[in-house]
Amino acid sequence: EAQVTQNPRYLITVTGKKLTVTCSQNMNHEYMSWYRQDPGLGLRQIYYSMNVEVTDKGDVPEGYKVSRKEKRNFPLILESPSPNQTSLYFCASSPHITGGGTDTQYFGPGTRLTVL
Amino acid sequence: GNSVTQMEGPVTLSEEAFLTINCTYTATGYPSLFWYVQYPGEGLQLLLKATKADDKGSNKGFEATYRKETTSFHLEKGSVQVSDSAVYFCALRHTGNQFYFGTGTSLTVIP
């Protein structure tokens, strides 16, 4: 089954304790992205990656890191989480389209993170 | 900069009513426009899209037309069902491959 998976689905942690949320896709997509969803703010893009070893900042990259060492994986790293990073996080992937760029995104089920 | 503005919710409709959710955008260049739907407890799913001016996206009875003159991409459905209850997001893809989403509009359809 074609899908985007995220782990963990739920996480409660404390301020300053490093954590990683994994994201994996089995569709051979070039494009991957991380979003956070907050009430009243919708989805905001954190980072995206057009391909292996290529990453770019989205709208809200502060406090986050990503890496893209393999095509299928795109982990989100919080080196020192803070309470304002409490949110619902979504990973997404997308194939390139003819002529360049990307198009329809396929989303994972989400990771609900609480930082105390 | 680039941004998407969609109508505030929540929206409550009776079954078989007509639905309109307004979406306007600000963007440089020629963005692609999307509507995504999020059912409770799930990730977002693409509902429809349009990649150039005057294109009409359609799926499952929903439609939206890319209007460059009014910078709008309003979502419509002629007769909603209870199963359409969800949160709807308007989004644009900037030519630089960055995505911008609206704040979402919650729709509840009552029998």
Image: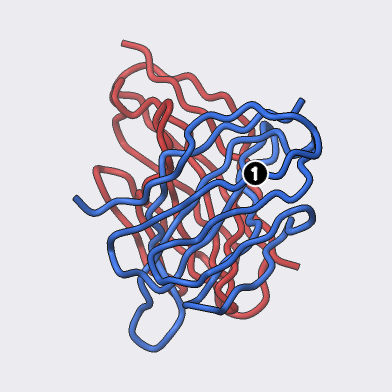
Chain colours: A blue, B red
B30 vs A43: above or below: below
Q: Nearer the viewer, residue A29 or B78?
A: A29
Q: Nearer the viewer, residue B62 or A99?
A: A99
Q: Is residue A77 left or right of residue A61?
A: left
Q: Which residue is mark 1?
A: A19
Q: Nearer the viewer, residue B88 or A114?
A: A114
Q: Position of residue B72 (x, y in %)?
A: 56, 58
* Residue type highlighted by circle 1: Leu
Q: Secondary structure at mark 1?
A: strand
Name the residue located 57 percent from the left edge and 63 percent from the top edge. B99
Q: Which chain hosts label 1?
A: A
B53 vs A46: above or below: below
**Quadrant the C terminus of chain A occupies:** top right
Name the residue located 58 percent from the left edge and 30 percent from the top edge. A11
Q: Position of residue A111 (x, y in %)?
A: 52, 37
Give the crowd class for mark 1: few <14, some 14-19, many >=20 residues within 10 Å: some
Q: Position of residue A37 (x, y in %)?
A: 61, 40
